[in-house]
Image: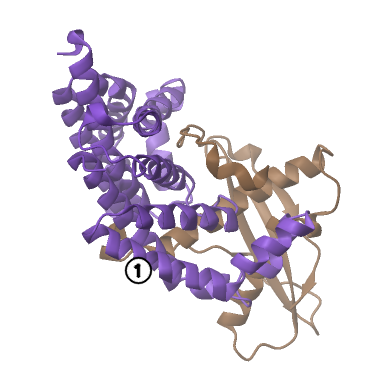
Amino acid sequence: MNLLRIFIPSWRFFDELGQIATVSHRTRLADQSDFGPWQTSILKPTQSPAAFLFNPAGNLYLASQALVQQLMVDILNLKNETDTGSLEELCSFQLLQKHIELQLRKNNSLLPPLFFQIKISVEDPNQPQNNYDAVVSKEYAL
Amino acid sequence: MNIPLLVLSERLILFSVLIQNLEMIYLHKNFSNQGVWSWGLLQKEYRNNLSKKLFGFIFSYYPFLTLQIVSALSCAIGIFIPQALSLWCATIVVILTCLRWRGNFNGGSDYMTVIVLCSLSLCSLSTASSATQLGILAQAGITYVSIQTVFSYFIAGWVKIKRSSWRKGIALTQLLTLSNYSVQPSIQKIVSNHKLSLILTWSVLLFECLFPFSLLHPDLSLLFISIAFLFHLTNAWALGLNRFWLSWMASYPILYFFCLQLSSRFSFFK
């Protein structure tokens, strides 16, 4: 059914702005025990003046955000036990993991062996007391 | 199909698909075997072996890139020489692209692109040169696009107007300052002024909720279409949502054509 999403239009643009899911990651070197600070994983691209017509970076960014939203739905299904399996088996989580892996490799060409961890936080700008971490993953070797 | 408004719509949607194809070609590394959206990862969504093999043949890197290039060339030709082949090619490639990206690449604009393409492809089966000669399939396609275009504004407005955060003008400020959208700093500055944000919010809400009135008269239709065009252009500039204005723009000639049909059939619309 997931694959048929495109044939079912939903015109409910921006109706709910309550909660925003953000992805961050942190790393540690193989010979260290402590992780560094959490860093934003999906960075907003800078908009070029031509973006109103041709905007590949912006659209890729939106696709990545849609991936995070899809992951949140998949996680909810896992929690409701409508789906079986673990977080790591989810296609959306594997895509996100790959996204972070590639970003780490891109930013550090001479990368020493390291481990990384992924966090998905849900933030509510209206009620910050309701902010919570939906996922803090285990460590993955790069 | 020789109806000028429908031909205009065809040219616009092919231009929109051409831009989408060029963006996809530009982003090709992202769906290569080493990219985030590699077929190696995505194929896990397909549990059926037959569909995995079938789509694997189309969705792996080189065949998918080739599809995008062929579609771009076909659209470029179709813009200057409108013909059914370009429309059908674009329809198939857009649907396959949506399936490959799990319907996630650009949500709403993908819906509108598919709806307009499918409807125009149906119209392309007709050789009609006037509204009265249209076959039932072509008429169904035109009606469907028009209704979905009206719904796209009305539903978006209705779900917002029901929320107090939108009615109070807070939601727009939050959307443009706190959300994950890549927003122009000048726009953020404007909406941080509450009065301006409230005026902008209610302008959008009223425009969206009143959009069904565009079906009542061709002049009203033109008025709403002009506002909608400016609305999408502003969104494209402020939020980088380029695909929205391109695909919605293609639906306007069809909507106007439908409105002309209504107006000629029912005297109370005159």
Q: Amino acid at mark 1?
A: Leu
Could you say which chain is coloured brown in the image?
A
Q: Is residue B240 left or right of residue B195?
A: right
Instruction: Identify whether A112 is placed above or below B93.
Output: below
Q: Nearer the viewer, residue B224 or B88?
A: B88
- Left or right of B113: which side holds A136? right
Chain B: colour as depicted: purple
| Label 1, residues with CA under 10 Å away: few <14, some 14-19, many ≥20 | some
Give the answer, above or below, for where B186 lies relative to B174. Answer: below
Question: Image quarter for residue B58?
Answer: bottom right
Q: Quadrant of the N terminus of chain A?
A: top right
Question: What residue is drawn where x is 34% and y is 44%?
Answer: B124
Q: Which residue is at the front of the view, B175 or B26?
A: B26
The residue wearing badge 1 is B73
Residue A136, relative to residue A113: is it above or below? above
In the image, B13: left or right of A23? left
Q: Is residue A95 at least partly visible in the picture?
A: no
Q: Answer yes or no: is residue B202 visible.
A: yes
Question: Residue B202 or B174: which is nearer the viewer?
Answer: B202
Q: Position of residue A130 (x, y in %)?
A: 65, 37
Q: Residue at x 50, y 34 (%)?
A: A10
**Residue B122 position within the rendered picture, expressed as x and y whole percent measured from the top left:** 40, 40
Q: Quadrant of residue A100?
A: bottom right
